[in-house]
């Protein structure tokens, strides 16, 4: 067995271990939470889809929606920040 074959087998085993750890880490999360977690952990969309048994399109849509939510603050968030500013000016 040559070095290239050994390295390939090692890479395959590490990939399996990584998938198992990712699956274990996300097993009690909702799909959207798991997608965000795996994305933040550096997984590519295609691999996230494989791990979560879904499509890469589903992963992309989920990430786009969460990114949009981060950009547009909720009304409640605005109210809280306004309340903080008012409280600071009254001190």
Image (cartoon, rainbow, N blue to C red):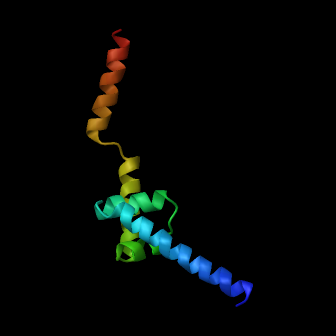
Q: In the image, what residue occupies the spot 71% across and 85% down?
A: 4
Q: Position of residue 39 (x, y in %)?
A: 46, 61
- Residue 64 seen in the figure: no
Q: Position of residue 3 (x, y in %)?
A: 73, 84
Q: Return the residue found at the far top.
A: 91
Q: Where on the picture, by quarter, is residue 75? A: top left
Q: Return the residue found at the far right.
A: 3
Image quadrant occupied by the C terminus: top left
Q: Relative to 45, is 77 above or below? A: above
Q: In the image, what residue occupies the spot 28% across and 31% down?
A: 79
Q: In the image, what residue occupies the spot 34% across and 29% down?
A: 81
Name the one closer to the observer, 19 or 66: 19
Image quadrant occupied by the N terminus: bottom right
Left or right: 87 with respect to 60?
Answer: left
Q: Position of residue 68 (x, y in %)?
A: 38, 54
Q: Return the residue found at the far front.
A: 1
């Amino acid at each position: 067995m040559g070095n290239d074959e050994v390295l390939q087998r090692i890479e395959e085993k590490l990939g399996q271990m990584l998938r198992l750890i990712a699956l274990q880490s996300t097993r009690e999360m909702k799909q959207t939470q798991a997608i965000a977690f795996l994305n933040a952990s550096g997984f590519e969309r295609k691999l996230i889809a494989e791990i979560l048994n879904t499509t890469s399109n589903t992963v992309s849509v989920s990430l786009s929606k969460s990114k949009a939510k981060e950009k547009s603050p909720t009304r409640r968030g605005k109210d809280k920040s306004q309340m903080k500013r008012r409280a600071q000016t009254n001190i």
